[in-house]
Amino acid sequence: EGYDPRQRPWYKSTVDAGKTILSAPYLASVGGLVVTIA
């Protein structure tokens, strides 16, 4: 509830880059280390 992906760092980085990006590894809110392709 209240989740807005446009507020996530990976989304903002993608918009700023203007292309597909691979994020740096980060801890997911549900646990575990993840990367995002956006």
Image (cartoon, rainbow, N blue to C red):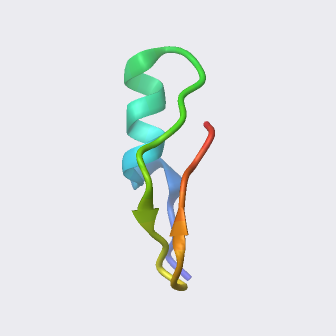
Total numbered badges shown on the rendered structure: 0
The residue under the point 58% across, 48% down is 36
The answer to which of 8 and 23 lies nearer the viewer is 23
Can you say which quadrant of the picture contains the C terminus? top right
Q: Position of residue 32 (x, y in %)?
A: 53, 78
The answer to which of 2 and 35 lies nearer the viewer is 35
- Is 32 above or below relative to 24? below
The answer to which of 19 and 22 lies nearer the viewer is 22
Q: Position of residue 3 (x, y in %)?
A: 52, 70
Can you say which quadrant of the picture contains the N terminus? bottom right
The residue under the point 41% across, 45% down is 24
The answer to which of 14 and 24 lies nearer the viewer is 24
The image quadrant of residue 20 is top right
Judge left or right: residue 31 versus residue 8.
right
- Is 9 above or below relative to 19? below
Q: Position of residue 5 (x, y in %)?
A: 52, 55
- Is 35 above or below relative to 17? below
- Is 13 above or below relative to 3? above
Judge left or right: residue 6 versus residue 37.
left
Q: Position of residue 9 (x, y in %)?
A: 37, 48
